[in-house]
Image (cartoon, rainbow, N blue to C red):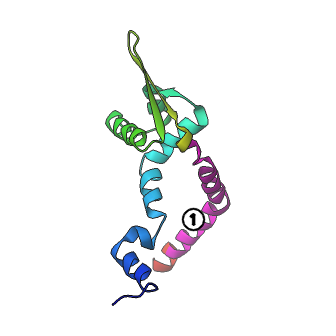
Amino acid sequence: MTTETSRPAADAAADPELACPISPVVDIVFSRWTSPILWSLQAFGRQRFVELERRIENITPKVLTQRLRQLERDGLVVRTYHPEVPPRVEYEISELGRTLSPLFAQIAEWGHVNLERVERARRQYDDERA
């Protein structure tokens, strides 16, 4: 018999997302190419596919297409098709996607303040094991 106080621990053990509630957010927002896409759309506004491709170095067209489709599905990006000759497609960050701006700003600030410390810690770790 489980009590109400023991159930959350048991549920957390069975479901990693309950043990770490930020995991689903990390999976959505911080996958390999998602962050640079969202950052670019936030920083530069509405863009065509080729503009995004130029701004995000080393991303392949296939991966960019996949990521944009997933972001559209997640509601973070809006795709607008313009039936012209030739057809034109533009992408922009959605209202939901814009709610991530404070999170990105906070992470950028953390990086500005702490990445040098991380590098020092890595060098120290590596030196101690050499």
The residue shown at (47%, 57%) is 25
Q: Is residue 116 rendered magenta in the image?
A: yes
Q: Quadrant of residue 66?
A: top left
Return the residue at label 1.
119
x, y percent for residue 75? 45, 42
| 126 to 71, vertically: above or below | below
For the N terminus, give its image quadrant: bottom left
The furthest residue to the bottom: 1
The residue shown at (60%, 37%) is 43
Label 1 Cα crowd, 10 Å radius (few <14 / some 14-19 / many 20+): few
| 19 to 25, vertically: above or below | below
What's the magenta bit mostly, secondary-structure-wise?
A: helix
The residue shown at (52%, 37%) is 94
x, y percent for residue 28? 43, 52
**Which element is circle 1 on?**
helix
Amino acid on which the number 1 mark rests in the picture = Glu
Magenta-highlighted residues: 98-125
